[in-house]
Amino acid sequence: MQIKKTFLPLALLSLTLTSLLGLERSVKAEENMPNEYRLIKKVVNKLAKSNDLGRRPIFFTINSGYATEWAAQDLNLCKKGECAYFGDLNPFKSYSGNSSAEVNEAIRQAYIFGTTAFFAYSNGTISIARYSFKTLDNREDLLSCTIAHELQHFLSDSIFNDSLKASQLPSNLSKEKREIAEARFSRQSEVEADQGSVIMTSNIGYPLDTCFKALDYKARIRGTADATSELDTHPGYKERLAKMKSFMAKYKAPSHSQNKTTLGEWHYDSELNLLKFSPK
């Protein structure tokens, strides 16, 4: 039997090779993924099994954290109030060039002395300081509560809604009263995100008081038990725990069959230091 030779068109061959190379890079990136990102995937996958995470992509990035800003200032890398750049550095890199020794030292000191730092952006990016994993001892219950809290901010569009409320304040309101009102909006958003974290972690089987204990734990490792002031963007220690306790007393968990599942795909980019979850 005569066998015919088949030739792929040049464009198709190029596309095939590009796809294979892309897949190879993707597999290699997954293999080199830091353990902290693997833990994020594990926690979010668990949350996604019994929660609706929406349809917008969610991004996670691990940075050097705000503690790096303090170290950078002490090392004369920047002036007070102008050090935010250092808090967003990639902590998995070793830097070279001018002042590289000081930059690497700032990241090292931050990792040792930082506590926890999680932040949700309105564009769906959740940043986590690398030292948070060390401080929380990689505990899945503590990370689940904290990540769920940040997911709630994104899913509820809390940053946008707080801005919308602020835009509706009387135009003749004094600057001081406007700042007080905006801080109050922010505190309420924090309370609602706390409540959302209770619901989300309860849905995946954690005891109802898990996030209550997590808040108390994090306050103790930070060494802060401040009372709430008018300009605080977050409730003080006692108020925050009291509001969560009150919510738990009234909350009735739905049956497991009522919980929604979010299917999705993951993509890790080591160059961007970014992990993406794409809900289907």
Image: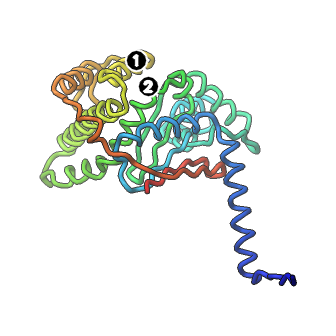
Examine the image and state in which quarter residue 220 appears.
top left
* Relative image position of residue 244 (x, y in whole percent): 24, 25
Give the percent coordinates (x, y) of residue 223: 41, 16
Q: In the image, what residue occupies the spot 45% across and 17% down?
A: 221
Q: Quadrant of the N terminus?
A: bottom right
Dot 1 and dot 2 residues touching (CB under 8 Å): yes
Q: Nearer the viewer, mark 1 or mark 2?
A: 2
Q: Answer with left or right where residue 107 lies relative to residue 248.
A: right
Image location of residue 17, percent across then percent down: 75, 69
Q: Residue at x 46, y 40 (%)?
A: 44
Camera-side residue of 34 and 238: 34
Left-right relation of 255 to 277? left
Q: Is residue 151 above or below residue 102?
A: below
Name the amino acid, label 1.
Tyr
Q: Which label is found at residue 217? A: 1
Q: Residue furthest right?
A: 2
Amino acid found under the numbered disc labelled 2: Leu
Whether residue 105 sits left or right of residue 40 in the image: it is right
Q: Quick check: 48 above or below 215?
A: below
Residue shown at the point (22%, 21%) measured from the top left = 245
52 relative to 170 in the view: left or right: right
C-alpha distance separating marks 1 and 2 = 9 Å
